[in-house]
Amino acid sequence: MTSSVLWRTRYQAAMAEMTKYTRYMANGGLLFTVYFVVLYGLVVYGRFLDQLDPSFPGNLVMGSLFIFLAFYRSTRTFLTEADQVFLLPSLPHLTGYMKRVRTYNALFGMIRAVIPFLAVAVLYVRTEETSPIGLFSLFVALSMIGAAANLSKLEGVGHRIVLLYATGAGVLVMLGMGSFSIVVTSLLLLTLHLKKQDQLPLMDWIALEQESRDRFYRIANWFVDVPRLSTTYKRRRLLSLLVEKIGFDRNRTFDYLYMKQFIRSTDGIGLIIRLTLIGAVFMWLGKDNEWLVVLAVPAFSGLTSFQLAPFTRAIDSHLLTRLLPFGDATASKRKVLRITSFLQVLVLTLIGYLISGFSTVVAGAVLALVVAEYYARKK
Amino acid sequence: MLLKINELSGGYGAKKVLHDINISVNQGELVGLIGLNGAGKSTTIKHILGLLPVKSGEILINGVSLEQDEQTYRKQVAYIPEQPMLYEQLTLREHLRLMAQGYAVEEKKAQERIDHYATRLRMTKQLEWFPSVFSKGMKQKAMILCALVTGSELLIVDEPFVGLDPLAIRELLTIFSELKADGKGILMSTHILETAERHCNRFILLHEGRIAAEGTTGELRDRYDLKDGSLDDIYVAAIEEAER
């Protein structure tokens, strides 16, 4: 199989799959909630910019963006597990495929920098003295970081190298020497170029593709069932020790199993922490608007409850669960959802009250608990 | 009688794989379930485990069917699958706790069993590991430990030796002997006939969803007129006869 044929078939297949899931996601009602949150976020941000003090440290925000952007990478190689067998004979002839993969990742990384740059640039030009060329050079430097973040793993270069250079460039921006940041990011790309791999590292590239796919599927999984979604679990020793305190009672077997799943999976406790933090930021941005703060509690709690739905799926669909005499799963699932929702509502309410001082936030908490109970009963 | 299968017919959807088979496993007995690929061994096991609906006939464990009392039925049977299936989010120790808890084993007794069997299968070090870092053999041992910690009356074992090292195979066979002595029953599907011949009390030979032959090695030798024949020879003779 030639490089161009392989690239074409793989790229088309990946895009078809992505389109399929994106369509499913667009059909879900949750997408409108996301649109609403984004639009409202833009309005709030616009107001924030209108009232912005010129002494606001815009260079710090722009510099931080360099570091922030370097953290995220999504490297696609479009290879699959079966390739470690079937691509072996073609391996020496895949230089063209490697070039295409690099180009795709570099371009995608650069494109990804556009929206964050635009968002911060409107703030930056209000607080810093800069010329269009200076701004453009910042954009080029930032897009290089985006490209490098995607390319580093392809060349077997540790991601920390990208973080190091990005920090260097970011610090220069923070110190008001933003025009030099392009030199740092060029050096980063030069380093990656020098480390360029001649032979396709099949296993590494397959793992990179799997990692990126999983990331996309995890998001898609909020909206629609994704089959064979592989998940990573974290040990979380301290929380795990607390779960061990659950009584050694047959009727509590599912409590134990679900709690372990909840604390170790990204769609359990990770989801709650993420959405609580976003909710807190949201309330802080709109702290002068009573309605916004009050409704943020049920909105983010409801969003969490809705998205928590798949957290037991890995357990429920496991063959072992069907074979064993474990007792009542539904009651345990409800228990976990109720406890976690209550704790999240409590935290959001406290944050809302401390940020805004509106005691009406309690009304929002009551509504949030009603919403949470609805989802718990729905399971 | 521990396991009693009466006139069982079943399969996948509309496809009938098993045709009126009768199988029994008594206490203290290790019964070998043998047959070619596609003979119906795994289908039989899936029916016993309640993973496939029975078309006709019945399956009883200690006189209880799955339809009568699912919890009691399931508590009496533990399963060692051919393909290990472990929860990715639990360590081995947590799996064992979960199994013991689910099967209502007393906590102290469970801990004793965990320590005892983990030591014998050389898995003590791996008790705190997640399955994602296990080798194929370790996963298989983990499944065996999960079944052993339950202390169930009946063990359903599907190709238990796949992926195991020779020491583990020997230890597992010793454990099976001890379980038999304790009055447990074991139904074991396997292709390793030499080992089966030495350790099974009886054999059931399945062919195309029907029982082609059954009995002890001696009974089967007599039937196929193979005086000094091994289980391998009997197996070939039985298949040839069934296909005639």
Image (spheres, grey):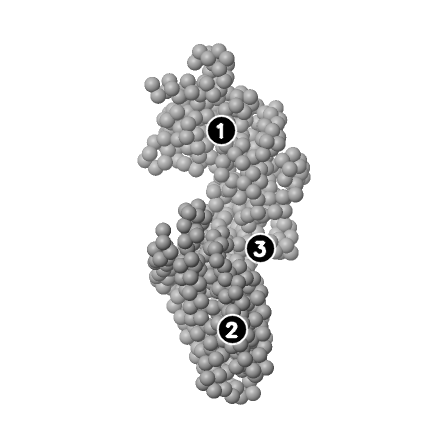
> Does any portion of residue A353 appear in the rendered image?
no
Q: Amino acid at mark 1?
A: Thr
Query: Which residue is painted at 39% across and 35% down in the image?
Result: B53
Question: What is the crowding at mark 2: few (fewer than 14 residues within 10 Å), some, or many (at least 20)?
Answer: some
Query: Which residue is painted at 63% across and 40% down in the image?
Result: B123
Residue B96 vs residue A195, the one in the foreground: A195
In which quadrant of the rendered image does the C terminus of chain B lie? top left
Q: Decide: is A257 above or below A292.
A: above
Q: Do the residues under discs 1 and 2 have CB atoms within 8 angstroms?
A: no
Question: What is the crowding at mark 3: few (fewer than 14 residues within 10 Å), some, or many (at least 20)?
Answer: few
Between the C-alphas of marks 1 and 2, the distance is 62 Å
Residue A193 vs residue B78, the one in the foreground: A193
Looking at the picture, do discs 1 and 2 lie on one chain? Answer: no
Residue B16 vs residue A207, the one in the foreground: A207
> Which residue is most to the left?
B14
Q: Decide: is A163 above or below B41.
A: below
Question: What is the crowding at mark 1: few (fewer than 14 residues within 10 Å), some, or many (at least 20)?
Answer: many
Query: Which residue is painted at 53% across and 27% down in the image?
Result: B186
Query: Which residue is painted at 45% across and 81% down in the image?
Result: A136
Q: Position of residue B108 (x, y in %)?
A: 67, 39
Mark 2, mark 3: which one is toward the viewer?
A: 2
Q: Secondary structure at mark 3?
A: loop
Residue receiving disc 2:
A186
Q: Position of residue B47 (x, y in %)?
A: 43, 33
Q: Decide: is B77 above or below A195.
A: above
Res. B190 mark: 1
Q: Amino acid at mark 3?
A: Lys
Tell me the chain of label 3. Answer: A
Between the C-alphas of marks 3 and 1, the distance is 37 Å
Q: Secondary structure at mark 1?
A: loop
Residue receiving disc 3:
A234
